[in-house]
Amino acid sequence: MVLARLCAVPVLTGRGAPDGTYLPPPHDSSGHTWHHSDQPLLRIIKEGGQAVYGAQEFKSQMRAFGDRLTDGDIEAIIAYFKTLWGPKEREFQASVTVQDREG
């Protein structure tokens, strides 16, 4: 799997690191990945968490993978995350994705 091959940290834990930085959240229904539309998820994977959420008080350990993954690879990862969500989370995420596209 592309995700397992690239990630040095267990991305399904969502735990904070001892240095106060944030690890990626759990990508199942217990996390908050499903709260985001597809576009920010693509940017986070491509550019890294800090680049997307560059607020000084937010320190993300989510690395950028844009130099190693195609947009198709990233879309496949997002599609995989969606298989980890329940029906309500998938429905919510689909609706925010549509809203994001419509502006």
Image (cartoon, helix red, strand yellow):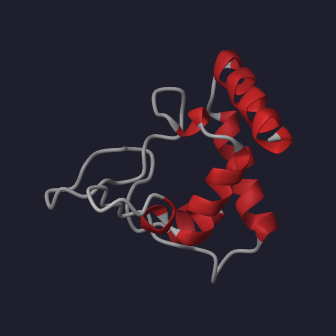
- The residue sitting at 48% across, 68% down in the picture is 51
Decide if residue 102 is on the left or right side of residue 47: right
Residue at 71% x, 52% y is 39
Where is residue 68 drawn, in percent x and y?
A: 64, 81
Asked whether 88 or 3 is in front, the reply is 88
Determine the image quadrant of residue 28: top right
Q: Residue furthest left?
A: 18
Classify 5 as above or below 96.
below
**Count of labels shown?**
0
Of residues 7 and 40, the one drawn nearer to the viewer in this rendering: 40
Q: Residue 85 appears in which quarter of the rendering?
A: top right
> Residue pushed farthest top?
88
Counting from the top left corner in percent of width and height, residue 87 is at: 71, 18
Q: Residue furthest front?
A: 103
Q: Position of residue 52 (x, y in %)?
A: 51, 62
Left or right of 23 on screen, residue 57: left
The quarter of the picture where the N terminus appears is bottom right
Q: Is residue 5 above or below residue 25?
A: below
The quadrant of the rendering that contains the C terminus is top right
Residue at 69 percent across and 49 percent down: it is 78
Q: Residue at x 72, y 47 (%)?
A: 38
**Residue nearest the viewer, comparing 95 with 57:** 57
In the rendered image of this protein, does residue 95 appear above or below residue 18?
Answer: above
Question: Of all residues shown, which one is farthest toward the bottom?
Answer: 67
Task: Report x, y in % for residue 7.
Answer: 47, 66
Q: Is residue 74 left or right of residue 16?
A: right
